[in-house]
């Protein structure tokens, strides 16, 4: 199949049809879709604001004198748990809910409102759990937890809400059009992300049923979240690929990739997630074989699908010159997302041992997804009746956030080369040379710039929320 189209070789009517078929964007939302999409967007923004507050508390927890006023002696790790869960777990889930609401038909719409209420209530309980009987902080992979009753109740409520939203996304998934085009490819990608999320939830429940409760807290939660946490990465990756194609289109680029090939890439990205149930059937959840199978599936499934889409989007961006002011923040988010995700992927090839190269790898990939979602928020705001993000601050924000995170992960890779261990801080790091100190210093500088970039995202979005948007030609419900 020829994936490249030469518009000059087509008749005018054919050129119009070809352009429409390659239009990687979703139509304007209906009134119902708009209300739900806005609500999930607000949850995501509030989660980022909350994570910013906890990042300030992280600094306070390490400040002599001030830390004595905090509720528990080990408040640094308590705040870190909630900061990570808000800035990654709640933010990603809220953005998924936003995009699934935009993609869904009107079926069982009330389920999504209930799901939003559960997720919102769970988020509040998790945040309050840092101050009310937080229990022991456990830095488990994928979902760090506090063993206090309020935090765990919030986590369960949030999980129930997310599960209901996933179920609604599957039931209300739209049919693909007969004249398969770019919008259909994006819809398939969003539907596939809901399928992978459902498999991740199945894995969490399966682990909950079979993981021995006699294990100590760290081992228990590490095993409990391993399978489902890996499966969720397919969900976030699919959302990122949807974001790349949509943002490239919104920048005015013509992606040299047919919608059918794009669908094939989404299918490949989804296919490996079905290794998840096999891993549970074939191996004990506590075995090395079980862990390695999840890791291998994630590496294969992501790499095969991402590279062709990334190359097509990159080729489409190269000819762009002098784009409109309203499109520049979108291009900044897209370019930064692709750069950070590529850096995270390359670092993954360098991992050896239990050192800080591991967090460098997943920080690069996670931030690549985050930047794509930030760009989609910028793209969707005017469609939802808000103002259009533009101006120097809106353009600088993705670059600053991306540059800060790039310095952060470069510092981690540098230090990891000297064997600096992960999940330790302060004197526990045992920095023996000036090179190790320099690497961790670079990591800290990058982290500070990234925090500023994240806060600027909230500032840019709040400015757009306060601006009156254009009159929307909303569609009637289908």
Image (tube, helix red, strand yellow):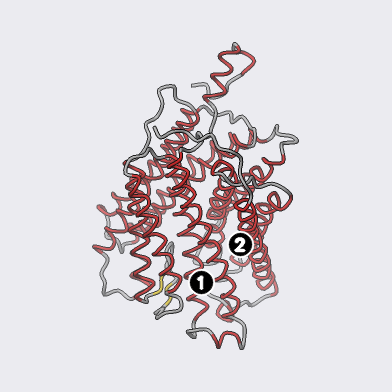
**Circle 2: element type:** helix
What is the x, y in percent for residue 463? 64, 54
For residue 465, above or below residue 330: below
Please tell me which residue is depicted at 42% across the width and 44% down the height of the picture: 100
For residue 393, above or below residue 73: above
Relative depth, front residue between 407 and 57: 57
Q: Quadrant of the C terminus?
A: top left
What is the x, y in percent for residue 179? 44, 22
Relative depth, front residue between 412 and 187: 187
Which-is-in-front pick, marks 1 and 2? 1
For residue 387, above or below residue 410: above
Q: Is residue 262 left or right of residue 4?
A: left
Q: CA distance from mark 1 to mark 2?
A: 21 Å
Q: Residues within 10 Å of mark 2 (few under 14, many from 20)?
A: many
Please tell me which residue is depicted at 41% across the width and 26% down the height of the picture: 177
What is the x, y in percent for residue 350? 56, 56
For residue 118, above or below residue 269: below
Using the rendered view, name the quadrant where residue 364 is placed: bottom right
**Circle 1: element type:** helix
Relative depth, front residue between 78 and 312: 78
Q: Is residue 243 left or right of residue 407?
A: left
Q: Is residue 168 left or right of residue 190?
A: left
What is the x, y in percent for residue 163? 33, 53
Disc number for residue 218: none
Q: Residues within 10 Å of mark 1 (few under 14, many from 20)?
A: many
Disc number for residue 80: 1
Q: Earlier in the sequence, mark 1 or mark 2?
A: 1
Using the rendered view, name the quadrant where residue 246 is placed: top right
User: According to the image, label 2 marks what residue?
Assistant: 413
Q: Do the residues under discs 1 and 2 have CB atoms within 8 angstroms? A: no
Please tell me which residue is depicted at 33% across the width and 57% down the height of the picture: 290
């Amino acid at each position: 199949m020829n994936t490249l189209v030469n518009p000059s070789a087509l008749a005018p009517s054919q050129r119009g049809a070809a352009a429409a078929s390659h239009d990687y964007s979703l139509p304007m939302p209906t009134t119902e879709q708009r209300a739900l999409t806005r609500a999930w967007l607000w949850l995501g923004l509030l989660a980022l604001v909350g994570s910013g507050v906890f990042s300030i508390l992280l600094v306070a927890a390490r400040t002599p004198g001030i830390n004595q006023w905090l509720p528990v002696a080990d408040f640094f790790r308590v705040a870190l748990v909630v900061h990570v869960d808000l800035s990654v777990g709640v933010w990603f889930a809220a953005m998924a809910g936003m995009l699934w609401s935009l993609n869904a038909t009107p079926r069982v719409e009330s389920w999504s409102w209930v799901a939003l209420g559960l997720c919102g209530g769970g988020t509040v309980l998790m945040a309050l759990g840092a101050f009310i009987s937080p229990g022991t902080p456990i830095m488990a992979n994928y979902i760090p937890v506090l063993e206090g009753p309020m935090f765990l109740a919030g986590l369960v409520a949030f999980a129930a809400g997310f599960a209901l939203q996933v179920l609604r996304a599957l039931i209300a998934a739209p049919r693909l059009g007969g004249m398969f085009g770019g919008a259909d490819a994006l819809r398939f990608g969003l539907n596939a992300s809901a399928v992978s999320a459902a498999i991740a939830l199945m894995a969490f429940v399966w682990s909950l049923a079979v993981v021995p409760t006699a294990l100590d807290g760290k081992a228990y939660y590490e095993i409990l979240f391993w399978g489902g946490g890996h499966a969720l990465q397919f969900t976030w990756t699919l959302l990122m690929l949807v974001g790349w194609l949509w943002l490239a289109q919104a920048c005015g680029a013509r992606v040299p990739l047919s919608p059918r090939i794009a669908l094939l890439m989404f299918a490949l990205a989804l296919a490996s997630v079905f290794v998840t149930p096999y891993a549970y059937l074939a191996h004990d959840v506590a075995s090395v074989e079980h862990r390695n199978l999840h890791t291998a599936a994630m590496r294969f499934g992501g790499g095969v699908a991402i590279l062709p889409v990334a190359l097509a989007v990159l080729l489409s961006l190269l000819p762009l010159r002098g784009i409109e002011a309203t499109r520049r923040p979108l291009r900044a988010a897209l370019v930064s997302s692709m750069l950070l995700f590529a850096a995270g992927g390359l670092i993954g090839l360098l991992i050896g041992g239990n050192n800080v190269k591991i967090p460098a790898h997943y920080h690069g990939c996670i931030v690549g997804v985050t930047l794509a979602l930030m760009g989609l928020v910028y793209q969707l705001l005017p469609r939802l009746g808000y103002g259009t993000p533009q101006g120097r601050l809106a353009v600088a924000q993705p670059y600053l956030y991306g540059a800060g995170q790039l310095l952060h992960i470069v510092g981690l890779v540098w230090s990891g080369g000297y064997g600096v261990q992960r999940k330790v801080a302060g004197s526990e790091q045992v920095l023996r040379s000036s090179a190790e100190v320099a690497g961790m210093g670079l990591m800290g500088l990058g982290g500070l710039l990234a925090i500023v970039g994240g806060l600027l995202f909230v500032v840019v979005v709040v400015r757009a929320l306060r601006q009156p948007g254009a009159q929307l030609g909303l569609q009637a419900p289908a």
